[in-house]
Amino acid sequence: MNGLLWLVAILGLAFAGVYLFAPAYLVALTIGLVRRWGRLSPKSIVVDGTSWPYLEGGPPDGEVIVLLHGFGGGRNNWQLNARNFTKQYRVITPDMPGFGDNIRNPDWDYGMETQAGRLQQFVQELGVDRFHLAGNSMGGFIALYYALNYPNDLLSLTLFDNAGVQSKNKSELEIAIAERKNLLIARTMEEFDNLLDFITHKKIPSPTFMKKALLKVQQRNFDFLDKIFWVLADEATGVGVTDRLSEISMPTVVIWGRHDSVLDVSCTEAMAAAIPNNRVVIFEDAGHIPMIEKPRESAQHHLELIAAS
């Protein structure tokens, strides 16, 4: 066996050993490598007595882009997408309260407008006055409230399959919600695999050790997440902010996956008709998370908006 084969064999044994005996280390290593690739660093700041974890990358003096994750997600959701911005822009992506490594206080209000208020406290604590805001799903709903309540803070708004807008057609999730079923959290690996298939159009390769780590988070916080889900669901399946869309004043781009089973693509029709300065982009081969399914392509449309703002 030559030297290269010996090296491959040793690395293979080392990987297997870590996988079997120290999977948490392997998860941390993988996340760290992806963060480095995306030019992001973990940071935290105290906001109103609570520590907010976030990722930051890019030049400190660059224009600021804030990225908000969806329900059940966290700051790591944007790692693949952020690389497209961090050479030129200062990118900030926080764990919102209730998610990731942020506080989970069962007594707090996790309504979308309340979360938007907490987000403003966060950016003010960072010393950020004007910025570009983007959000996916629940994060998009929070971003809509932010745009409506604090319009002078925003240079632009980018919405990825956002909640909070009435659709002409019911999605699979909305039909399930009417039957009081929550399809966005899992207790078993089978349910977690079904969840991943539900939110994407094409299966995204995911190592088993990463899926197990994500599932453990959901299992550990199942009841808490379920409580937040129904707060979000009740807001999102009502009027939401549909009747206030005409008040959005900043340049806006709406990015959606044609095959979104969580929030139907017909939501874009209401936004296209009501938001004054908007553009709608629909990816024919994406589901609910285009910033992960189509990171480069969605970033390109996002960058075009920022450059024109």
Image (cartoon, rainbow, N blue to C red):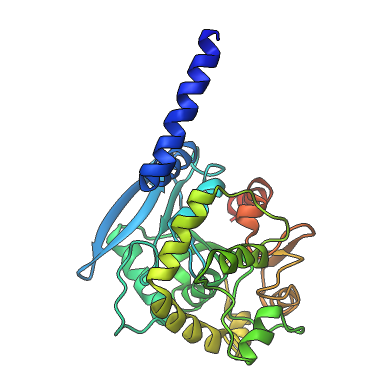
Q: Residue furthest right?
A: 284
Give x and y (percent) for residue 110. 40, 81
Q: Residue furthest front?
A: 1
Give x and y (percent) for residue 63. 45, 49
Q: Quadrant of residue 259?
A: bottom right
Report whether 200 appears left or right of 35. right
Report whether 284 appears left or right of 20. right
Report whether 126 appears left or right of 306. left
Front-most of residues 18 and 145: 18
Instruction: Give the residue displayed 36% in from the left and 43% down from the top.
Output: 21
Instruction: Give the residue displayed 40% in from the left and 76% down from the top.
Output: 115
Q: Residue furthest top?
A: 2
Relative to 193, is 17 above or below?
Answer: above
Front-most of residues 153 and 290: 290
Instruction: Give the residue displayed 41% in from the left and 36% down from the top.
Output: 17
Q: Can I make out residue 252 in this image?
A: no
Give x and y (percent) for residue 194. 63, 67
Q: Quadrant of residue 213?
A: bottom left
Instruction: Give the residue displayed 49% in from the left and 37% down from the top.
Output: 37
Relative to 64, is 159 above or below?
Answer: below
**On-image quarter of the C terminus:** bottom right
Q: How many marks?
A: 0
Q: Can I make out residue 114 in this image?
A: yes
Give x and y (percent) for residue 159. 60, 66
Report whether 164 appears left or right of 91. right
**On-image quarter of the N terminus:** top right
Front-most of residues 153 and 267: 267
